[in-house]
Amino acid sequence: MTPQEGTSLPVRSMEVARVLAEAGIAGRVRELTESARTAAEAAEALGCDVGAIANSLVFLSDDEPVLVLTSGRHKVDTAALAERWGRGRLRRATPEQVRRATGQAIGGVAPVGHPQVLPTVVDAALGDYPRLWAAAGTPRTVFPTTTSELLRLTGGLLLPVGP
């Protein structure tokens, strides 16, 4: 499966591409021929290590949606992250809460292109990879990026998200 660059991207992906362009990010949104809904699917489609996939996960902290960009190689330790971040308990958002907070569906949530900027943590483990891939608003669209770009785009904090 190879990525296809196209001019007829889905609406949500076009919004992500617009934000990237306005921020001066060189990586272009690409539409894949198959789903990249999970980190494993995305890594297989892109021919990269699963750890180089930047998963966009939405949690609620004190009823506020927050975004955690985590490496596909591990899970978020919510208790440890909440303590490091200085936030209240983190709990996974429901699919409806994710869509309300981001305008995007689970499996395709991008780090940007949301109705409002979400407080964000970028997983320190993503720094192990010179090139990352993040979802671009749908389960079939992605864009190449780096840890420093994700930090700049989201205004996020660089923290370990694992135990």
Image (cartoon, rainbow, N blue to C red):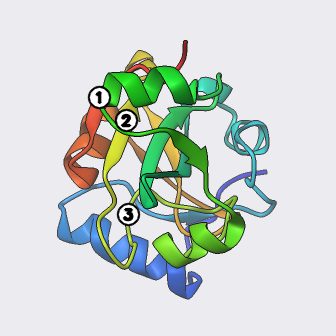
Residue type, numbered disc 2: Val
Residue type, numbered disc 1: Leu
User: Can you say whether 40 is above or below 128 in the image?
Assistant: below
CB-based contact (under 8 Å), mark 2 and mark 3 = no
Q: Position of residue 135 (x, y in %)?
A: 56, 56
Q: Earlier in the sequence, mark 2 or mark 1?
A: 2
| Relative depth, front residue between 108 and 28 | 108
CB-based contact (under 8 Å), mark 2 and mark 1 = yes
* Residue 108 in which image quadrant: bottom right
- State the residue position of label 1: 158
Q: Tell me which residue sits at (73%, 53%) in the image.
A: 36
Q: Tell me which residue sits at (63%, 31%) in the image.
A: 72
Query: Can residue 11 be seen at all in this image of the molecule?
Result: yes
Q: Which mark is residue 112?
A: 3
* Mark pair 1, 3: CA separation: 16 Å
The residue carrying pointer 2 sits among few (fewer than 14), some (14 to 19) or many (20 or more) residues within 10 Å by Cα, namely many
Front of the two marks 1 and 3: 1
Q: Tell me which residue sits at (59%, 45%) in the image.
A: 91
User: Can you say whether 82 is above or below 56 in the image?
Assistant: above
Q: Position of residue 16 (x, y in %)?
A: 41, 71
Q: Please, what secondary structure does the residue beneath circle 1 have?
A: strand
Q: Position of residue 95 (x, y in %)?
A: 70, 67
Q: Earlier in the sequence, mark 1 or mark 3?
A: 3
Looking at the rendered image, the quarter that the C terminus falls into is top right
Q: Please, what secondary structure does the residue beneath circle 3 have?
A: loop
* Mark pair 2, 3: CA separation: 13 Å
Query: Can residue 103 be seen at all in this image of the molecule?
Result: no
- State the residue position of label 2: 122
Q: Position of residue 63 (x, y in %)?
A: 46, 60
Horizontal side of 113 relative to 70 (left or right) equals left
Residue type, numbered disc 3: Val
